[in-house]
């Protein structure tokens, strides 16, 4: 995967190392993911997903996520992630 950017409600990062660093905490909380819908149109794909999350402290919770992928030369070139941040621990 060649990732050039990530956009979330909180930040924008560029490059693989920055992406891995900024998302590792989130990915470590994922207990399950359900792909609810997948739409593809040319070089764009949108996945509507439901994540079951278990934070290190506090109760687990569910988060619905929209992930918009850009594809160039058969590889993911961008990823925009949209989610409601209110259920996340503060």
Image: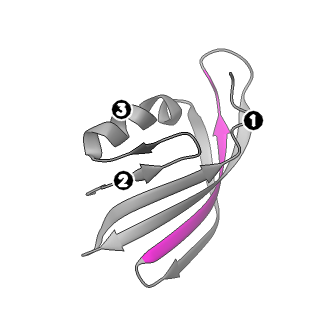
Residue under the image location 27 percent in, 47 percent down: 15
| Location of residue 37 (image quadrant) | bottom right
Quarter of the figure with residue 52? top right
Task: Tell me: residue 73, above or below residue 88.
Answer: below
Mark 1 to mark 3: distance in Å? Answer: 22 Å
Q: Is there CB contact under 8 Å for labels 1 and 2?
A: no
| Residue at the spot 35% in from the left edge and 71% down from the top edge | 71
Q: Give the residue pinned by disc 2.
A: 5
Query: Which residue is drawn at the image coordinates 72% and 28% (left, top)?
Result: 60
SS for tag 2?
loop
SS assignment for the magenta stretch, majority: strand
Q: Please tell me whether residue 18 is drawn above or below residue 3 in the rendered image.
A: above
Proximity of marks 1 and 3: CB atoms separated by less than 8 Å: no
Task: Residue under label 3, please give it.
Answer: 21
Q: Are marks 2 and 3 in contact (CB under 8 Å)?
A: no
Disc tally is 3
Label placed on residue 86? 1
Q: Which quadrant, please, contains the N terminus? A: bottom left
State which region is magenta.
44-55
Q: Secondary structure at mark 1?
A: loop
């Amino acid at each position: 995967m060649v990732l050039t950017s990530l956009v979330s409600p909180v930040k924008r990062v560029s490059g693989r190392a920055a992406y891995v660093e900024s998302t590792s905490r989130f990915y470590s909380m994922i207990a399950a993911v359900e792909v609810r819908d997948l739409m593809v149109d040319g070089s764009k794909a949108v996945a509507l997903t439901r994540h079951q999350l278990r934070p290190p402290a506090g109760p687990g919770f569910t988060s619905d996520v929209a992930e918009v992928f850009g594809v160039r030369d058969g590889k993911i070139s961008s990823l925009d992630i949209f989610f409601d941040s209110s259920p996340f621990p503060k």
